[in-house]
């Protein structure tokens, strides 16, 4: 009996650590923060144009409404996505707001996704979902955190794919 109980306790801690390990936490702010520096090819202007022309226009329906500041070197924006809670009525699914920053420098680009907040009448940081000791804790929060981790990884993957310059195919003269 003790072995079974101890195995359950170990399994609980392992699954808890695994669920939280998918989320990168900034040590200074203690917030979820997806950040990566990506080496690029081309001039700063060419890279910026690829980001805005290919990624922003493909990923967001209306990039100008998403962007909050754009000085040609740093793009800052705010957007949202919806989490799936399994309810057949999609309008009951929670929304998460996030902020992103894309910084363009010669030879490299850095993106940052941070400030994830549950969209309610008063926005709540999703980091509250990490605290299992919270009196309002709900088991569905683990699923939400996994969805946020998947979102951050997918966003970064799509961003990196759009940074690759398109190959120009020269036509043969006849």
Image (tube, rainbow, N blue to C red):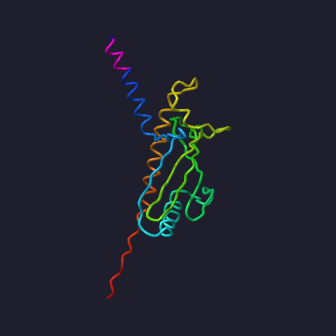
Q: Residue at x 51, y 41 (%)?
A: 32
Q: Which residues are magenta?
A: 2-8
**The one of 144 and 51 positioned closer to us in this rendering:** 51
Q: Residue at x 67, y 38 (%)?
A: 122
Farthest-out residue, bottom: 174
Q: Residue at x 47, y 49 (%)?
A: 35
Q: Residue 70 at x, y = what percent? A: 60, 61
| Magenta stretch holds residue 160 | no
Q: Is residue 11 above or below residue 101?
A: above
Q: Residue 130 at x, y = what percent? A: 51, 32
Which quadrant, please, contains the N terminus?
Answer: top left
Farthest-out residue, top: 1
Circle count:
0
Which quadrant, please, contains the C terminus?
Answer: bottom left
Q: Is residue 6 above or below residue 158?
A: above
Main secondary structure along the magenta-highlighted residues: helix
Q: Is residue 22 above or below residue 170?
A: above
Classify residue 66 as left or right of residue 14: right
Classify residue 40 as left or right of residue 102: left
Farthest-out residue, front: 28
Q: Residue 156 at x, y = what percent? A: 45, 52
**The one of 128 and 43 positioned closer to us in this rendering:** 43
**The one of 168 and 73 positioned closer to us in this rendering:** 73
| Magenta stretch holds residue 3 | yes
**The one of 94 and 137 positioned closer to us in this rendering:** 137
Q: Residue 9 at x, y = what percent? A: 38, 20
């Amino acid at each position: 009996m003790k072995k079974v109980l101890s195995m359950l306790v170990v399994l609980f801690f392992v699954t808890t650590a695994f669920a939280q390990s998918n989320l990168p936490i900034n040590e200074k702010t203690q917030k979820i923060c997806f950040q990566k520096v990506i080496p690029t090819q081309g001039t700063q202007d060419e890279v910026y144009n690829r980001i805005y022309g290919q990624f922003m226009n493909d990923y967001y329906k209306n990039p100008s409404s998403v962007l909050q500041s754009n000085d040609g070197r740093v793009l800052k924006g705010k957007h949202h996505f919806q989490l799936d809670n399994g309810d057949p009525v999609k309008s009951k699914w929670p929304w998460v707001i996030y902020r992103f920053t894309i910084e363009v420098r010669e030879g490299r680009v850095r993106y940052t996704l941070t400030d994830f907040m549950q969209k309610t009448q008063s926005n709540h940081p999703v980091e509250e979902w990490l605290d299992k000791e919270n009196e309002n804790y709900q088991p569905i929060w683990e699923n939400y955190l996994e969805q946020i981790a998947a979102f951050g990884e997918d966003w970064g993957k799509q961003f990196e794919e759009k940074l690759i310059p398109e190959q120009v195919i020269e036509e043969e003269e006849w």
